[in-house]
Image: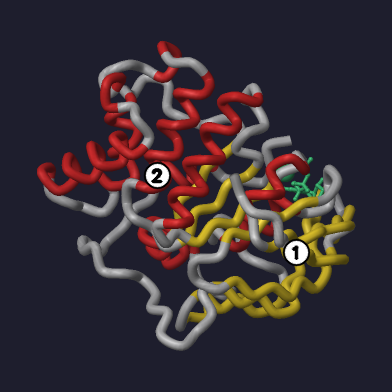
C-alpha cells in the first residue's frame, strides 16, 4: 500500500517565507533524533498502534534503510520523519528544533525546505509538464522565475531528463517518471531525502537506475532514509533498521561494498 501520505498537503502548501535559508540548523545536533515516538490511529473507535515507542537517530549523510513486513509501520514512520504527520507521543528533534508539536503550517514550512519525497507511484501531476512538476514545490517558496529555472534544470540534468522537459508524465516510461520524481525531490536542495518503496513499480533495470541515483546523491552529501521490501537493495545502505509491529526489533550495519 502507498501509505498514510497526505499528497494534497505536499502539493498545496501555503508558505510565507521567501528565502532559501535552511529551516533548521544542525550544528552539533543529530540531523534526526526520535525518542519514544508513538502513533495511534483511531478509526471508528478502533485503535491501531502503528508505532510503539520508536527511538532512532540519523546523522547527516547517512543512508538508512527501513525494512519490515506489510503493515509494520514503515510508511507511518517515514511520514512522521517527513513532517507529513505528527506523532501521538514522543519527541522528534530535527537539527536544532523540536518539531513533534508543530502546527500544520510550521511543518509545511520546514518540509518544503528540508525534505524531499519519492513515492512508489511517482505521484507526478498528470496535466503538468515534467518541467512544471519539478518546479511546483519551488513555486511555493516564492522564488524568482530565474532562480526556479536554474534549480529545475540542474535537477533534471542530474537525472538525465532535460530532453523530456516538455513532456507530460503519461508520455514517459515508469522509469523516466520516477527519475522526474527524484528531480522534484532534490530540486530544492533538501537536507533529507525520504523514499517509500521508490523501486516498487519499476522493473529491476529501472530500479537499479533509481538506486544508483540515490547512491550518488548520498555520496554528494544527501541524507537518505528509504523504505523497501526488496532485500537486494540492502547493499546500498550502511544501516538497516528492521521494524516489526511498530517497534524497531533489530538494526544491522552493512559491511558489503556497494556496487
Ligand atoms: N491513516 C490511517 N488511518 C488508520 N490506520 C492507518 C492509517 N495509516 C496506516 N494505518 C495503519 O497503521 C499500520 C501501519 O501502516 P503503514 O502504512 O505504516 O505500514 P507499512 O509498513 O508501510 O506497510 P506496507 O509495507 O504495506 O506499505 C497498519 O496497520 C495500517 O492499517
Ligand atoms: Mg508502506
Q: Is residue 32 left or right of residue 220?
A: right
Tell which of 119 and 141 is nearer to you: 119
**Crowd around label 1: few <14 · some 14–19 · many ≥20 (10 Å):** many
Q: Is residue 32 left or right of residue 240?
A: left
The residue tagged 1 is 39
Tell which of 194 and 12 is nearer to you: 194
Q: Is residue 17 left or right of residue 222?
A: left
Q: Quadrant of residue 100?
A: bottom right
The residue tagged 2 is 12
Tell which of 28 and 53 is nearer to you: 28
Q: How is the image coloured?
A: secondary structure
Q: From the Cβ of disc 1, is ligand 1 less than 8 Å away?
A: yes
Quadrant holding the C terminus: top right
Secondary element under disc 2, as helix, strand or loop, is loop
Secondary element under disc 1, as helix, strand or loop, is strand
**Which labelled disc corresponds to residue 77?**
none
At horizontal 64% and vertical 79% (from top left) the residue drawn is 91
Taking 162 as reference, is 68 above or below it?
below
Where is residue 105 drawn, in percent x and y? Answer: 42, 62
Quadrant holding the N terminus: top right
C-alpha gap between disc 1 and disc 2: 24 Å
Where is residue 17 drawn, in percent x and y? Answer: 25, 64
**Crowd around label 2: few <14 · some 14–19 · many ≥20 (10 Å):** few
Where is residue 35 drawn, in percent x and y? Answer: 70, 79
At horizontal 20% and vertical 52% (from top left) the residue drawn is 142
Earlier in the chain: of badge 1 and badge 2, it is 2
Amino acid at each position: 500500500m502507498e501509505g498514510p501520505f497526505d499528497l494534497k498537503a505536499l502539493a498545496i502548501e501555503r508558505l510565507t517565507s521567501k528565502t532559501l535559508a535552511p529551516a533548521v540548523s544542525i550544528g552539533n545536533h543529530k540531523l534526526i533524533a526520535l525518542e519514544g515516538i508513538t502513533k495511534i490511529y483511531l478509526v471508528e473507535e478502533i485503535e491501531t498502534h502503528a508505532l510503539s515507542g520508536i527511538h532512532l537517530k540519523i546523522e547527516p549523510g547517512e543512508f538508512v534503510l527501513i525494512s519490515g513486513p506489510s503493515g509494520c509501520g514503515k510508511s507511518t514512520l517515514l511520514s512522521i520523519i517527513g513532517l507529513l504527520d505528527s506523532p501521538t507521543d514522543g519527541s522528534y528533534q530535527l537539527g536544532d528544533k523540536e518539531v513533534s508539536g508543530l502546527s500544520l503550517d510550521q511543518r509545511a514550512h520546514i518540509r518544503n525546505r528540508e525534505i524531499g519525497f519519492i513515492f512508489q507511484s511517482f505521484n507526478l501531476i498528470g496535466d503538468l509538464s515534467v518541467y512544471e512538476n519539478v518546479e511546483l514545490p519551488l513555486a511555493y517558496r516564492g522564488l524568482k522565475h530565474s532562480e526556479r529555472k536554474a534549480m529545475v534544470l540542474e535537477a533534471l540534468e542530474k537525472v538525465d531528463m532535460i530532453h523530456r522537459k516538455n513532456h507530460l508524465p503519461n508520455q514517459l516510461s515508469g522509469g523516466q517518471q520516477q527519475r522526474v520524481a527524484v528531480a522534484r525531490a532534490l530540486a530544492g536542495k533538501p537536507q533529507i531525502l525520504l523514499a517509500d518503496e521508490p523501486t516498487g513499480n519499476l522493473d529491476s533495470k529501472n530500479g537499479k537506475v533509481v538506486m544508483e541515483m540515490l547512491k550518488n546523491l548520498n555520496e554528494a552529501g544527501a541524507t537518505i532514509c528509504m523504505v523497501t521490501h526488496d532485500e537486494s537493495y540492502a547493499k546500498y545502505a550502511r544501516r538497516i533498521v528492521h521494524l516489526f509491529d511498530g517497534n524497531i526489533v533489530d538494526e544491522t550495519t552493512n559491511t558489503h561494498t556497494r556496487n
